[in-house]
Amino acid sequence: LAHQRRSIRGFVPTPVPRALLEQAFATAQRAPSWCNVQPWRVVVTEPPATDRVRQALVAAAKSSLPSPDVPFPLDYPSPYQEHRRACGLALYQSMGIARDNKAGRYDAWLRNFELFDAPHLAVVSCDKRLGPYAYVDVGVWLGLLLTAATAAGVDTCAMASVATYPAVLRRELSIPDEEVILFGIALGYADPNSAANRCVTSREPLTSNVRFVA
């Protein structure tokens, strides 16, 4: 299933049945966490709430600067910068957007806040008092959720972009100030006609990330 999972950036509007969503999230609920604290907190939208959040995010993206609860890296040293650039290149090439096409790139960036037309958005947060160890736990939960969604036939895209406007998400989804907003997840069914969905990213060989010591 891990090999089948991929980030989808173009969805059809058909909602996912609640039972399938609950199935995926129930599986992810079994994720291990530090001292079993289970820190993930999730709000999942369904139509028409998804459209309200979508419109609010687009309006914010067009009119204000991002201000995420968890600051994004200012610099990506090697080899992370090369991975990041290769990912962006693969995506823009799949959509036929040239490097000097500023309007096209802006429209592609705005698609993040349109949630790629997904019928559902999950916003993931955790208690600010728990600190970065909780972020590790939430990352473990995320990996299990994405795999469980794939098993249920549900397509996904984990998105840091929507977390850049936490005030919008707090207002629209009643997320308390005591929770740090970490990321969003678009959920739905892939649009087979979406050019962005032709994007395929690469993975480094195991030896680039894992060392065995005897």
Image (cartoon, rainbow, N blue to C red):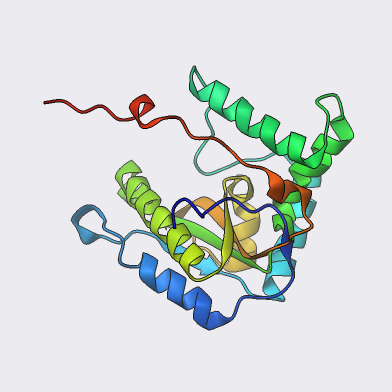
User: Residue at horizontal 62%, vertical 41%?
Assistant: 200
Q: In the image, 173: left or right of 204?
A: right
Q: Measured along the vertical axis of the image, is residue 162 above or below residue 89?
A: below
The image quarter containing residue 13 is bottom right
User: Residue at horizontal 57%, vertical 42%?
Assistant: 68
User: Residue at horizontal 64%, vertical 75%?
Assistant: 46
Q: In the image, 43: left or right of 145?
A: right
Near-viewer residue (170 or 213): 213
Q: Would you say residue 190 is visible in this rendering?
A: yes
Q: Which residue ends up furthest to the top in the rendered image?
A: 78
The image quarter containing residue 206 is top left
Near-viewer residue (119 or 14): 14
Near-viewer residue (199 or 69): 199
Question: Residue 198: horizontal and vertical position, in percent?
Answer: 70, 47
Q: Measured along the vertical axis of the image, is residue 204 above or below residue 82?
A: below
Near-viewer residue (76 or 1): 1
Q: Quadrant of the C terminus?
A: top left
Question: Residue 197: horizontal and vertical position, in percent?
Answer: 70, 50
Q: Measured along the vertical axis of the image, is residue 129 above or below residue 67?
A: below
Question: Residue 160: horizontal and vertical position, in percent?
Answer: 57, 45
Q: Quadrant of the N terminus?
A: bottom left
Q: Would you say residue 127 is visible in this rendering?
A: no
